[in-house]
Image (cartoon, grey):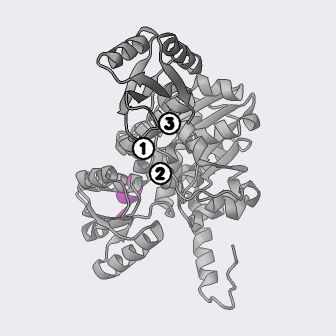
């Protein structure tokens, strides 16, 4: 990042002094005050050991389940602390924010409870589920722009016109203190953690957690995590962690922030010890594993820390590690696709191509063979005209649920023994 030149920017020095003053007041004492303020307002979410993940790192892996938080995300913590700090005059003016979903719901939820009018600007491609949930909490939602930068610019126009109070998603002292309470709870439950893994978007969560965790245990190893789609903080602080591969899309849109907060960046520069940038495949694997192994639902950003453990498991061998599952507001369609894709990768959902004599009763005999060997037909279709096959013959395309790859081969052999030509179609 190119540094500002005070000679070319007269406001630089005053801005720097202001930021430094704010940073001086961002201490564990302020985070502890926020923790007291949040009692009875938000949940103290579970901190559980994930034995399956402990096996991966040959140590102890603990998950802080903020996906079970009110509104489904840690964002509700910072939103409340910010809103509760407003004066009566500021509350009367109403608040505004920009968000891709979780911060929007946190602001909307608490604003409704406090009787504050709230406007939320969200990108036009925000999932219907997140938009409707935000509206359900009473906020006025405006869809504008294709990314958070365009949302922010539009928010600034609306503030100028209507004098709303900004509730920034991450670059705000009160928000940072609220998010930092996550670390207090984690270290209260497991005081001797060796390392913390924290997903980073704008950096509010990581900044608050860094301040709290380092004050409690200066030796704790704090690792930031970002998606390869948008490694904005990694690019600035740990450029050696970035690969040349950059996906065109991400399911971790909650941490796809191009520009981290200035306050947050200053804190992370001082406290972050390491960084991991993970590819989409690991995030998908983490979502599936959390669902299948821990029976908990996570969104893409929420699973990023677990993805980092799967990706960099050798770095944490024998360690006691805490990872935050920071949100669970996943689109049901995306979750469904990930789970089905996982079944395919584990050989539990297999495609078969079976040649049959196109005669009455033949399909019943075929399905009976599959059922007898324990296969469950997930999807089946006849193909008579789009394959190179004799008129009296046909192909069956079947997707069959199996126990594993060995079971799939047993089904294929049973079909062959029953007089059918059958082959497994590799994905």
Q: Identify the residue under disc 2.
A: 178
Look at the numbered disc 3 and give the secondary structure of its residue: helix
Look at the numbered disc 1 and give the secondary structure of its residue: helix
Q: Is residue 312 magenta?
A: no
Residue 229: x and y in percent read: 59, 57
Of 8 and 338, which appears nearest the observer?
338
- Figure quadrant of the C terminus: top right
User: Does residue 81 appear left or right of residue 19 in this picture?
Assistant: left
The residue drawn where x is 48% and y is 15% is: 415
Residue 26: x and y in percent read: 57, 58
What span is in magenta?
80-88
Tag 2 near tag 1, CB within 8 Å? no
Q: Identify the residue under disc 1.
A: 334
User: Does residue 379 appear left or right of residue 182 in this picture?
Assistant: left
Q: Is residue 211 visible?
A: yes
Cα distance between the residues tagged 1 and 3: 10 Å
Q: Can you tell which of label 2 and label 1 is closer to the viewer?
A: 1
Residue 300: x and y in percent read: 50, 46
Tag 3 near tag 2, CB within 8 Å? no
Quadrant position of residue 233: bottom right
Q: Earlier in the sequence, mark 1 or mark 3?
A: 1
The residue drawn where x is 44% and y is 53% is: 78
**Helix, strand or loop for the magenta stretch, by majority:** helix
Tag 1 near tag 3, CB within 8 Å? no
Cα distance between the residues tagged 2 and 1: 30 Å
Q: Identify the residue under disc 3.
A: 341
| Above or below: residue 71 compared with residue 9 | above
Of 58 and 71, which appears nearest the observer?
58
User: Does residue 398 appear left or right of residue 4 in this picture?
Assistant: left
Q: Residues within 10 Å of mark 2 (few under 14, many from 20)?
A: many
Of 244 and 174, which appears nearest the observer?
244
């Amino acid at each position: 990042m190119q540094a500002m030149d005070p000679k070319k920017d007269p406001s630089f020095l005053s801005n720097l002094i202001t930021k430094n003053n704010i940073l001086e007041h961002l201490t564990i004492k302020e985070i502890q005050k926020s923790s007291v303020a949040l009692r009875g307002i938000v949940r103290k979410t579970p901190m559980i050991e994930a034995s399956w993940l402990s096996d991966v790192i040959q140590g102890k892996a603990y998950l802080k389940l903020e996906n079970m938080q009110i509104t489904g995300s840690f964002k509700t913590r910072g939103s409340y602390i910010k809103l509760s700090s407003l004066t009566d005059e500021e509350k009367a003016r109403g608040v505004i924010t920009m968000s891709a979903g979780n911060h929007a719901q946190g602001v909307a939820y608490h604003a409704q409870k406090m009787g504050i009018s709230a406007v939320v600007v969200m990108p036009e491609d925000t999932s219907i589920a997140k938009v409707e949930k935000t509206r359900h909490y009473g906020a006025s939602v405006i869809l504008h722009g294709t990314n958070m930068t365009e949302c922010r610019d539009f928010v600034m126009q609306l503030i100028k016109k209507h004098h709303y109070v900004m509730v920034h998603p991450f670059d705000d002292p009160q928000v940072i203190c609220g998010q930092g309470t996550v670390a207090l709870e984690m270290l209260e439950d497991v005081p001797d953690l060796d390392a913390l893994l924290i997903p980073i978007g704008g950096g509010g969560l990581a900044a608050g957690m860094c301040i709290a965790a380092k004050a409690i245990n200066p030796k704790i190893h704090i690792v930031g995590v970002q998606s390869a789609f948008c490694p904005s903080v990694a690019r600035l602080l740990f450029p050696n962690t970035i690969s040349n591969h950059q996906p065109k899309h991400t399911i971790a849109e909650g941490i796809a922030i191009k520009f981290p907060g200035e306050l947050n960046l200053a804190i992370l520069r001082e406290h972050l010890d390491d960084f991991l940038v993970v590819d989409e495949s690991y995030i998908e694997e983490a979502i599936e594993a959390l669902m299948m192994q821990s029976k908990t639902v996570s969104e893409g950003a929420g699973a990023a820390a677990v993805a980092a453990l799967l990706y960099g498991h050798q770095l944490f061998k024998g360690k006691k590690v805490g990872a935050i599952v920071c949100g669970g507001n996943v689109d049901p369609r995306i979750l469904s696709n990930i789970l089905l894709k996982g079944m395919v990768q584990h050989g539990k959902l297999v495609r078969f191509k079976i040649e049959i004599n196109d005669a009455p009763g033949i399909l019943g005999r075929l399905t009976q063979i599959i059922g007898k060997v324990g296969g469950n037909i997930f999807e089946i279709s006849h193909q008579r005209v789009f394959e190179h096959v004799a008129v009296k013959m046909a192909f069956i395309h079947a997707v069959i649920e199996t126990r594993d790859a060995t079971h799939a081969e047993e089904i294929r052999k049973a079909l062959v023994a029953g007089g059918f030509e059958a082959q497994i179609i590799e994905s």
